[in-house]
Amino acid sequence: MEIPEQEFLAPGHRGCAGCGATVAVRLALKMLGPNTVAVSSTGCLEVITSQYPETAWEIPWIHVAFENAAAVASGVERALKSQGKDDVNVVAFAGDGGTADIGFQALSGAMERGHNIIYICYDNEAYMNTGVQRSGATPYGASTTTSPAGKKSFGEDKPKKNLPMIMAAHGVPYVATASISYPEDFMKKVKKAGETEGPAYIHVHQPCTTGWGYDPSKTIELGRLAVDTGAWILYEIVDGEFKVTYRPLQRKPVNEYLNAQKRFKHLADEEKEKIQNYVNQVCAELKI
Amino acid sequence: MTVKIGTVKEPGSSKMNKTGSWRTFRPVLDEEKCIDCENCFLFCPEGCINKENEIDYDYCKGCGICAEECPVKAIKMERD
Amino acid sequence: MLKVISANRAIAESVRLSKPKVVPVYPITPQTSISEYLAQFVADGDLSAEYIKVESEHSAMSAAIGASATGIRVFTATASQGLALMHEMLFSAAGLRNPIVMGNANRALSAPLSIWNDQQDSISERDTGWLQFYAENAQEALDFVLQAYKISENEKVLLPSMVCVDGFILTHTVEPVDVPSQEEVDEFLPEYKPKHSYLDPEDPMSLGTFTDPNYYMEARYAMEVAMQASKDVIRSVNKDFAEKFGREYGFIENYMCDDAEIILVAMGSICGTVKDAIDTLREQGQKIGLLKIIAFRPFPKDEIYETVKNAHRIAVLDKNISFGIGGVLFNEIKAKMDVDIRGFILGLGGRDVSPEDIKKIVDITKTSTESDKINWIGLKEEEI
Ligand SMILES: Cc1ncc(C[n+]2csc(CCOP(=O)(O)OP(=O)(O)O)c2C)c(N)n1
Ligand code: SF4
Ligand code: SF4
Ligand SMILES: [Mg+2]
């Protein structure tokens, strides 16, 4: 695949060294190109890219609030349509909190209405911008500031909300999961999403050095471990047709992924085993 | 009074903010070893490596991803 | 053309004539028929707009903001709980300087749940940066929507406007309304073409950025400057409107205030009842007048003062209450000018206001010695 050199997210942004969110945006925008309007929800990405009087965005971009990226994108899309600018891509970049929790209703509404938008949830598995609080996308066992590990707690006690499948249940034409550590797979999916008539939803897994607790150089490595252990699965659902897009040759033990991060450091073997069993079960169903 | 604050009309103007000053380790590329795989270009969170594998030190934050992801260890992190 | 229609229908007609390109709207009593009329206009091809069937008022305003940000005209409408749900987005629309026009069918806020009229909903949004106009009848509702676009879209203003109509009293009763022709409206209201900000790949801009303490205050200051500047714009739009359509409006309406000893101050449909009561009282030789507030934001303090300064006393009628201090209009007038003033809370949650109530207010105003007292009109003692 020929990958365009042109960048649509400029350097100088205030992301942590090693931030995975900006990698996701850079790669996605390379596929969508300059004829694109982007919408962001409040969160790390918005804050690090738009500190007035500067912006990292090379394309038109708007931020309104935390919970409404999908609704704002709906308005942008219809307004462009009303002006005959149907050829412009409208993409929303929203965090896992802005998607799974507070923005869930607006997202469901937008998906159901069939707007021609590309909604990309960049999933770092917590509210990073406000200091690592849990979200509905925080995985089982992760210690966050609102699901802390303690004498009577092993961290987050509920499994990650399965957003891509909930989006698929809306019957939208394109749903995919992705990882920044598998850039070609991710970019192909963004391209397909851009070519889709109607709503497309991509859920891209994105390690966060600050929130997960690992050395910034390991961002891509961590994302890869998530996929190679089966903790995160890459698939797409095109017009209801489910397909796994990447199968690790040999699945690694999930401990390799867990042990590399501070947020899972406190877990007892028993909990780690539960996680491994859960991953095994999901992977068995998908023949991974 | 013109409406001004809140809207930025210079796309990509974050380039005024030279984040190279954040760095403690600098990635240095050994061109001899480089196999042009484009990994560093793809994975840099700053987008400050081009396809010629040139690193823009004005913005490089020294995260070390490029060195870590280089399959032939052509990039070394050195103290700045 | 004269049509016998409700204020909701009048607003819908006005929106059709204003040609917004996007209409995101969510139904709520007593606004509902506005959303239905507009849906039908679009379905019949009478309004060429994208009608977005949003899943909430929060998303209605969010979509309106996104659409307006591309540089087009937008309309939405709501009431009460819906307006309260939009609260956060009202600040965003104003701060992003989106000249959205919204109809609000004034209705009480829960709890306890009430679908009937008072003005607590829109009054509670007075600090969001929206201009607010209160209609006395369906004709005003139609006329104010047309004017609101022209005012809001003016470069010196670029703040959104809310046109408020009393729920049921105006939204569900019919009266003759002069509906202008498309040609007349087109001449009055040119297409909206923003220069300050817009989303367009040909000219990329970032909107709604993150602003640190070095800049935020100036952004808010610019909004206050715009709100003040809107006064001149309103004057000139009122003038244009009168020339074009023959109906004259100002920030306030002066009904027999010039020689009045007591002046009542009110907003919205209640002004009809007050005028009737005044006619009777005048016949009895009592010098009473009414100052009707049309523009609540920007607050027309000079116009109010000029009108009331020679009266012995003024009485302010509030269909809202700020608990612990009383009616909002009463307190704002009291804070802004040195007048002998009395405050009345009435008509909450659809409580009827009769001409007798107005006479009672006049009597209390004449005899009351306490200017701080919150006087409740129409309370049922047996239910307290
Ligand atoms: C209505 C509202 N509630 C809460 C907040 C505070 N807040 C801002 S960003 C954020 C978390 C964002 O999390 P996520 O969407 O996962 O994005 P991330 O920062 O992780 O990239 C929160 C809680 C807000 N801005 N608005
Ligand atoms: S906290 Fe995480 S997501 Fe946020 S800027 Fe830092 S690395 Fe990126
Ligand atoms: S060290 Fe990090 S910021 Fe610097 S060039 Fe390498 S990947 Fe980019
Ligand atoms: Mg997050």
Image (spheres, grey):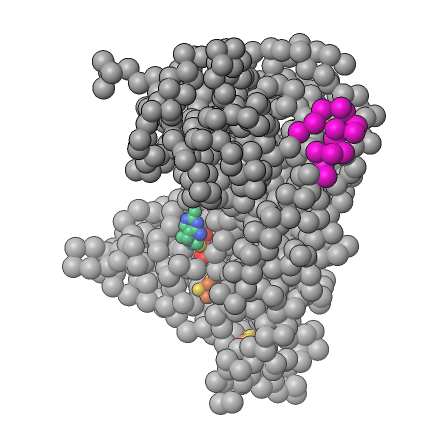
State which quadrant residue B13 falls in: bottom right
Q: Main secondary structure of the magenta part?
A: helix
Residue at left offset 39%, top offset 63%: A211
Camera-side residue: A116 or A250? A116
Q: Is residue C270 left or right of residue A90?
A: left
Residue A129, position in %: x, y?
43, 60
Residue B71, relative to residue A72: is it above or below? Answer: below
* Residue A81 makes an appearance in the image: no
Residue C10 seen anywhere in this rendered image of the structure: yes
Residue C25 % position (x, y) = 58, 29
Identify the residue at horizontal 54%, vertical 55% (top origin).
Answer: C220
Q: Could you tell whether C95 is left or right of A266 in the image?
A: right
Q: Which residue is outermost to the left?
A: A151
Was residue C241 drawn as part of the magenta stretch in this picture? yes
Front-lying residue, B31 or A219 = A219
Percent across and percent down for residue C371 are 34, 34
**Image quarter of residue A153:** bottom left
Nearer to me, B40 or B2: B2
Residue A270 spot, x, y in % from top left: 22, 56
Q: Which residue is drawn at 47% across and 44% down?
A: C336
Quick check: B53 left or right of C84?
Answer: right
Q: Is residue C323 magenta?
A: no
In the rendered image, the vertical position of residue A285 relative to residue A276, given as above or below:
above
The part of the chain drawn in magenta is: C236-249
Quadrant containing the N terminus of chain B in the rendered view: bottom right
